[in-house]
Amino acid sequence: MKNKLRLLLSLWSVLAVAQTVIAAEVIHEEKSLYRDINVVQTGDRRCLIFNVHRGDRNQTCLDVSNRDELIFSYTKMSFAGLLLTSQPKKILIAGLGGGTLPLAFNDLFPDAQIDVVEVDQAVVNVAKEFFFFEENENMSVAVNDARVFVKRAGILGEKYDYIILDAFGGDYIPEHLLTQEFLEEVKQIMTEDAVLVANTFSTSRFYDHESVTYQRVFGEFFNFKLPASGNRIIITQLDPLPPRGNLITRAQSLAPSLEKYGVPLLEYPARLSTRIDWDMSRRVLTDQYAPANLLQND
Amino acid sequence: MTVEMLGARIMAPYFGGSISVWGSLITVFMLALSVGYLIGGRLSTRNPNPKTFALFFIAAAISSIPIIIFADAIMRPIFLMIEDPRYGSLFASIFLYFIPTSILGMISPYSVRLMVDSHEHSGHMAGLLFFVSTIGSAGGTLATSFYFVLWFDVNQILWGAVAVLLLAGSAILLINYLLQKRAADAQVSRYEKQT
């Protein structure tokens, strides 16, 4: 009897999954040199998906009836960097995705100048056409490799006070965006009080290498993980990290303005950890040694 | 192929990892090889000999060394002058890889000439050479992208490639010297027998 029930339950869950798959409608397919991009809509939820054939990887989702609310926890987690700074004026976001994150920042800080770098023109097209992303006088997208953009910004002496690295979508990791040299170049374009937020990996041996590399360049950093999310956000700055008390005060004053995006900022301070939970003996990733994709599979 | 696989990695810090960087790299390698084939074929018509053949390997090794030592010095001014990473990577590829790759391209046609002793066998020998060199390329690609980058620094792998080329060149010189010596000895002993 118990077995039968279990069978029934599993059958039901299979059906439920099948139904959501059926209800999901592909409303747009775009081929690019890098990947196939699909826009899939299920009810009001519209998602940008890379690599459909290898299992769904939602890159960005959007609720078309409530466009302000952010869906993914990792997108929301990118706001945790605001616990370390007050009012960013010049923001750099590497990796556009559906553009929901830049839109939210533009909405939250309308006077800040936002530069977005995205390597794939097709992603920009899809974000504009299906995810309500728009450039305006304070927010523009450069179609370029983030490494090239950052290096040139450094040479031109440009500085940013809030930098989000979110260029790690899909299966292939851009190895030149993980190295010590790249992070040094990022450091060059940070103002003294700038905050760096990097959306990275929390699994595999690669976690160790990446942590060691960030530690080498920035010293101590906040490691931000949520139990439900496979992502890990690294948050750091050039100055020593603030005490937790400051984070909590900041969260309390900022939380109301983030409510409409669905960001539970008050929960974040307790999750920011400086505890070293990686293997310190791993090798630092450099331009000479960065087999990130091979390590990821290990 | 080992150098080609690493070529993209060497250029990524300046020109990114976009598909156009791979495009530049492969274009330059193809152009360099075609020029190398042409020159190698032409050189093989003038007094073909194993010493010149060995020199190709040694010259390729020496002309690869700037990739290791001067990569930054070569790429930095190009990065500053050319804003578009497509053309930046194209010019960087030319300066970094054109000369060593074209010298490597000379090896194949020249070795056809050295190994062929009759018209009948020329097709067979050419086929065999293409077989060996293409299998070598496949092996170099696989070993580099699967394992070498996991075990070594980029520059260590490049030094390894330089060492292999130098070894191959010296091995040819040594074998040639031994063969000539043996032939000379044989001639001397024949002469002694006759007298």
Image (spheres, coloured by chain):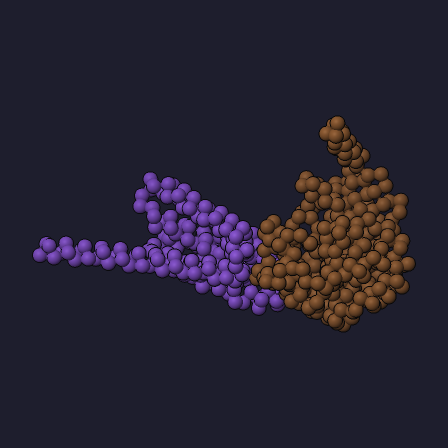
What residue sits 74% from the left and 67% below the top?
A: A237
Q: Position of residue A288 (x, y in %)?
A: 57, 62
Depth check, front residue: B100 or B168: B168
* Left or right relative to A130: residue A154: left
Residue A240 appears at what percent x and percent y? 74, 71
Dividing the picture into quadrants, the one containing residue B175 is bottom left
Point out the residue furthest to the front here: A1
- Color of chain B here? purple
Residue at 73% from the left image edge and 68% from the top image edge: A189
Residue nearest the observer in this picture, B28 or A204:
A204
Coordinates of residue B178 in the picture (x, y in percent): 27, 57
Q: Which chain is brown?
A: A
What residue appears at the point 70 percent right and 56 percent down from the top-left corner?
A: A200
Q: Nearer the viewer, residue A263 or A58?
A: A263
Quarter of the image with the N terminus of chain A in it: top right
Looking at the rendered structure, the number of numbered marks drawn on it comes to 0
**Visible in this render: residue A151?**
no
Nearest the eye: B164 or A175: A175
Picture quadrant of residue A18: top right
Q: Toward which corner of the image does residue A152 lie, by quadrant?
A: bottom right
Residue at 75 percent of width and 48 percent of height: A59
- For residue B182, say whether it is visible: yes
**B185 displayed left or right of A181:** left
Q: Position of residue B115 (x, y in %)?
A: 34, 48
Vertical comparison of A111 with A65: above or below: below
